[in-house]
Image (cartoon, rainbow, N blue to C red):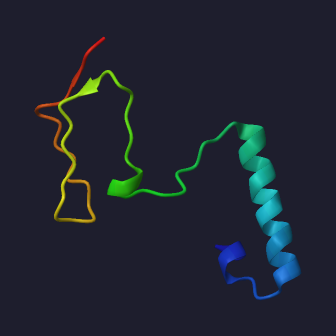
């Protein structure tokens, strides 16, 4: 919240670098994009059908299975 409301570009950059450092130290993998165009699975994930008429994923896994 603080980073997104900071008006001074230099202070904002410093906050972003601090956030980045903390994420890297923690081994975190933040989601930076999520929509139908960025959905991906391993080849063994079968039966997933992405919605084509919505920006939302509509996750319903009744027909999803792992082929391992």
Up the image or down, 53 lies above or below 31; here it is below
- How many numbered marks are there? 0
46 lies left or right of 41: left
Which residue is at 81% across, 50% downward?
Answer: 21
Measuring from the top left, give residue 23's x and y in whole percent.
71, 47
Residue at position x 37%, y 47% from top? Answer: 39
Q: Quadrant of the C terminus?
A: top left
The residue at the far top in this view is: 68
Percent x, y for residue 43? 35, 25
Q: Which residue sits at x=49%, y=58%?
A: 33
Report the residue at 37% width, 34% height from top. Answer: 41
Report the front residue among 30 and 47: 47
Quarter occupied by residue 6 = bottom right
Write down the quadrant of residue 20 in the picture. bottom right
Q: Quadrant of the N terminus?
A: bottom right
The relative height of residue 53 versus residue 62 in the rendered view (above or below) is below
Foreground of the two, 59 or 18: 59
Q: Which residue is farthest bottom?
A: 7
Q: Say whether residue 68 is left or right of residue 47.
A: right
Residue 16 place in picture, x, y as percent: 77, 65
Image side of residue 40 versus residue 49, left or right: right
């Amino acid at each position: 919240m603080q980073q997104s409301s900071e008006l001074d570009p230099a202070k904002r950059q410093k906050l972003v670098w601090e956030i980045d450092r903390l994420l890297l130290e923690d081994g975190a993998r933040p989601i930076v994009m999520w929509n139908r165009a960025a959905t991906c699975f391993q080849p063994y994930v079968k039966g997933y059908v992405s919605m084509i008429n919505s920006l939302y994923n509509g996750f319903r896994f009744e027909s999803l299975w792992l082929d391992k």
